[in-house]
Amino acid sequence: DAGITQSPRHKVTETGTPVTLRCHQTENHRYMYWYRQDPGHGLRLIHYSYGVKDTDKGEVSDGYSVSRSKTEDFLLTLESATSSQTSVYFCAISEFGGSTEAFFGQGTRLTVV
Amino acid sequence: GQQLNQSPQSMFIQEGEDVSMNCTSSSIFNTWLWYKQDPGEGPVLLIALYKAGELTSNGRLTAQFGITRKDSFLNISASIPSDVGIYFCAGQSTQGAQKLVFGQGTRLTINP
């Protein structure tokens, strides 16, 4: 299995509070991605990174920010959580970007109440 | 954004039956990937396709990269209970070189 660890695995938070999810990899892959999964929508890309300090937006980036200060860590931050951000969040890594396989973490289930 | 249309959305079959699902896109894709997701887990890669027309097998699974580069299918032969789960297609289009776009998923249920 690819060395990807997401933390926390589960979190319940209140509306308006900041939340940070962490993705840690031990594969030294250049590309890292954050997806959210909701019923009927499959996996939608939030943000991705193509190197340290290099990030770009995905299709559902509003309300989210990311940071990558080290190759192995990719952080997803919800500055002020809303109920619409209740979802399962997956981190993925890829050695050469979209043209090669992406490997996924086990997910973080976030509930905003 | 880029869209992948995956069908069917759900399937209810008997154990031992063959399964077929497909993905289509309005844009050309360079890569097609098929993933399976078990409950409470992240998606796991099943098959990767890199060339138009490519046909690849992984045990009872077979997938093909369509000649037009706008579609792909996944077949599962002689289904067994552990095939239950959600199957996703994913692709990298010529417009988004660093991103993988996912279909909505096909939920497979098997009656013993």
Image (cartoon, rainbow, N blue to C red):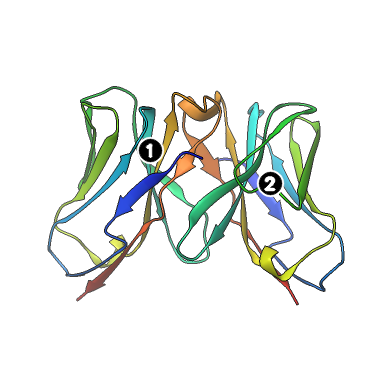
Instruction: State the residue lying farthest toward the right.
Output: A17
Considering the numbered disc 2 on the image, is that residue within a helix, a strand or a loop?
A: loop
Mark 1 crowd level (few <14, some 14–19, many ≥20, 10 Å Cα)? many
Disc 1 secondary structure class: strand
Seen at 67% across and 49% down, the residue is: A5
In the depicted structure, whether residue B12 falls above or below residue A60 = below
Q: CA distance from mark 2 to mark 1?
A: 23 Å
The residue under the point 34% across, 36% down is B26
Residue A34 in percent (x, y) is at 64, 45
Q: Which residue: 32% across, 62% down? A: B9
Question: Where residue A11 appears, x then y in whole percent?
Answer: 74, 68
Which residue is labeled 2 in the image? A61
| Left or right for B29, reference A68 | left
Q: Is residue A62 above or below residue B14?
A: above
Q: Which residue is mark 1?
A: B33
Judging depth in this view, the residue of B61 and A48 nearest the camera is A48
User: Where residue B52 appears, x then y in whole percent?
Assistant: 25, 23
Q: Which numbered disc, 2 or 1, marks the residue closer to the eye?
A: 2
The residue at the point 53 percent across, 41 percent down is A103
- Looking at the rendered image, the quarter that the C terminus of chain B falls into is bottom left
